[in-house]
Amino acid sequence: MNSHFPRIITLLRKERGLSQKAVAESLGVSQALLSHYEKGIRECGLDFVVKIADFYDVSCDYLLGRTPHPTGATVQIAQPAAISRAAQESMGQALLFNSLSVLYSILGNCGNEDITNETSAYLFCEVYRLFRTVYSANPKNPQGMFTIREKLADGRAAAGAEIALSNICCLLSGEDLDSLAGLPKSELPALSPEKLSESYPSLVSSLFTLLQQAELRMGAPTAAAEKPKKKK
């Protein structure tokens, strides 16, 4: 087995508000054994993997960390019509477009325009930062289209993004900020992989894949890179 399995079965149980005792009884194992499985102390057999996958209504591949989608579905690209055919062929661009569509839809459902505006400000600064870096890589490219001096651009763009992110965190905590209105706790989005899959069936695979790829870049372990543990 791998480190994904213990983590995922623990998260699934907690997401559903179930106790170890209740899940163990439903699966026909002792609570102590389930606890060992969740902590990664002991490895289970394939029959148990199938049984717990059926219990939580997810795929075995999802439990083993082989796919970010609970159902095991592959990425379905919903291509935006507004971009060129060449851009549509870019998987990365489609993942970003679909993932941002989900994010903005969630924010729209919260009904807080200030949070949505601050989210756009954060993204604007980060896109500006990356574009300016690419544009300025060739020293022959003229800088006349920018008003911020080149040596100041990266730091100020990063600062602008961090200010927007700080504002978002404050507003999501329910606190007002100057003229910006905080979001009441009752309006916070209730989210889970299952709810996201139900609400955004054509987009959510892109979001799950983007999150997985981002965590891999951050150093999250892959299933292939993990060494099997010795059975005790």
Image (cartoon, grey):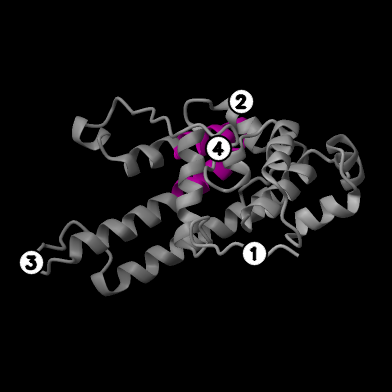
Asked if residue 177 shows in the view, the reply is no
Mark 4 vs mark 3, CA separation in Å: 45 Å
Indicate which disc, 3 or 2, sits on the residue closer to the N terminus: 3
Look at mark 3 in the image and give the residue it sits on.
Answer: 140
* Residue at the (31%, 59%) spot, across then down: 130
Count residues near mark 1 (Cα–Cα under 10 Å), then give few for <14, some for 14-19, many for 20+.
Answer: few
Asked if the stretch drawn in magenta spans residue 89, the answer is no
Is 72 rendered above or below residue 6?
above
| Residue toward you, 89 or 135 | 89
Indicate which disc, 3 or 1, sits on the residue closer to the N terminus: 3
Count residues near mark 4 (Cα–Cα under 10 Å), then give few for <14, some for 14-19, many for 20+.
Answer: many
Indicate which disc, 4 or 2, sits on the residue closer to the N terminus: 4
Look at mark 2 in the image and give the residue it sits on.
Answer: 198
Look at mark 1 in the image and give the residue it sits on.
Answer: 229
Closest to the camera, between mark 3 and mark 2, is 2
Indicate which disc, 4 or 3, sits on the residue closer to the N terminus: 4
Indicate which disc, 1 or 4, sits on the residue closer to the N terminus: 4
Q: Are marks 3 and 1 in contact (CB under 8 Å)?
A: no
Q: Amino acid at mark 2?
A: Glu
Closest to the camera, between mark 1 and mark 4, is 1
Q: Secondary structure at mark 4?
A: loop
- Segment tinted magenta in the rendering: 99-121
Q: Amino acid at mark 1?
A: Lys
Closest to the camera, between mark 3 and mark 1, is 1
* Residue at the (70%, 47%) spot, across then down: 45
Q: Amino acid at mark 3?
A: Lys
Return the mark for residue 31.
Answer: none
Closest to the camera, between mark 4 and mark 3, is 4
Dividing the picture into quadrants, the one containing residue 13 is: top right
